[in-house]
């Protein structure tokens, strides 16, 4: 990445992961800055050599991109209070559920703004982030935003803002669905006579292996599942229980529920 200055407002979990990812990818500490009123958060990031400040205005001055990494509930106040943000500076919001129209209302109608939806595995460099840019964003700014979010995993551009509700339902909330399945598998393992540690190891390594197989293969998940399901076998016995309970439809209903909630939150967190 060339020498763009990248500032983070809010130095919590997400910002720390992105900063560490950027440093690991070769971005110089002198290019990075973070602001946060919490001295403890800043103390942790100070050790990385980046600039830190408790003043958001100081952090924003001279930055090419301002990454907004505060909770959605405080975002409006944070942006309205900024007095140093210039109309050409790229705003990159990772706050879940806050619509572009609100971000523009709290800054400037022509502000270049990109809205991102990352997920928790970003904290371990295996995130999945979807991005959506408004019309004021230049090609170079899109590239820069993509490089920043790629420091925490994979990226994907979506063509319309509404798609971010579907993204939230799939990848945003998705890690919890897999954790839920893991919990149930561990419990079943214990019921079947394994100790918790063994049941957990078997479950987690299986989840990891299945994800690696599905990710590294051109074969669709449906085919991968069929490949390991012999007629009359053990996998078929388990899957027939899922089918009898209409688990596929239950999962779809759950994701529709998540997307509906995402749309509601946009209203709650949006303007004024
Ligand atoms: N974590 C995830 O997996 C994830 C996934 C998707 C999206 N996101 C989004 O990412 C954003 C950050 O999440 P996070 O998990 O990193 O949250 P976090 O750990 O709570 O970090 C937010 C930081 O912002 C600080 N802050 C509060 N008010 C501020 C202000 N006025 N100026 C500057 N900093 C301020 C907070 O300080 P205090 O603690 O003192 O309030 C905290 O250190 C959220 O909007 C969330 O929706 C996170």
Image (cartoon, rainbow, N blue to C red):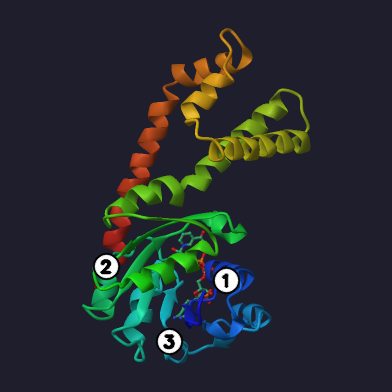
Task: Give the secondary structure at mark 1.
Answer: helix
Left or right of residue 147: residue 252: left
- The residue beneath circle 1 is 22
Q: Earlier in the sequence, mark 2 or mark 1?
A: 1
Q: Are marks 2 and 3 in contact (CB under 8 Å)?
A: no
* CB of mark 1 near ligand 1 (< 8 Å): no
Q: Position of residue 125 (x, y in %)?
A: 59, 59
Residue 41 occupies which quadrant of the picture? bottom right
Task: Give the secondary structure at mark 3.
Answer: helix
- The residue beneath circle 3 is 60
Task: Give the secondary structure at mark 2.
Answer: loop
Q: Tell me the crowding category of disc 2: few under 14, some 14 to 19, or many 20 or more residues within 10 angstroms, Cα based.
A: some
Kindly identify the residue that appears in the image at 33 percent across and 65 percent down: 98
Q: Where does the C terminus fall, quadrant-wise? A: bottom left
Disc 1 from disc 3: Cα separation: 18 Å
Question: Which residue occupies the extreme left position in the image?
Answer: 109
* CB of mark 2 near ligand 1 (< 8 Å): no
Q: Position of residue 258 (x, y in %)?
A: 37, 46
């Amino acid at each position: 990445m060339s020498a763009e200055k990248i500032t983070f407002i809010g130095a919590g979990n997400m910002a720390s992961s992105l900063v560490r990812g950027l440093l690991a990818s070769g971005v110089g500490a002198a290019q990075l800055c973070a602001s946060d009123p919490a001295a403890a958060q800043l103390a942790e990031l100070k050790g990385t050599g980046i600039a830190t400040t408790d003043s958001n205005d100081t952090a924003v001055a001279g930055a090419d991109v301002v990454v907004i990494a505060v909770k959605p509930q405080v975002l409006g106040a944070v942006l309205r209070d900024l007095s140093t943000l210039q109309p050409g500076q790229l705003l990159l919001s990772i706050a879940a559920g806050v619509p572009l129209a609100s971000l523009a209302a709290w800054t400037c109608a022509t502000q270049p703004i990109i809205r991102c939806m990352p997920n928790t595995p970003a904290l371990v460099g295996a995130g999945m982030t979807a991005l959506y840019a408004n019309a004021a964003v230049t090609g170079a700014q899109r590239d820069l935003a993509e490089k920043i979010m790629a420091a925490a995993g994979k990226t994907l551009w979506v063509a319309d803002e509404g798609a971010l509700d579907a993204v939230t339902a799939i990848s945003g909330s998705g890690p919890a669905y897999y954790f839920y399945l893991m919990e149930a598998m561990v419990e079943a393992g214990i019921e079947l006579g394994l100790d918790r540690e063994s049941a957990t190891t078997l479950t987690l390594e299986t989840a990891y292996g299945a994800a690696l197989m599905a990710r590294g293969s051109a074969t669709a998940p449906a085919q991968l599942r069929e490949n390991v399901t012999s007629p009359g076998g053990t996998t078929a016995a388990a899957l027939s229980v899922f089918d009898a309970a209409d688990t596929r439809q239950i999962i779809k209903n759950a994701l529709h529920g998540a997307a509906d909630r995402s749309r509601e939150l946009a209203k709650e967190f949006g303007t004024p």
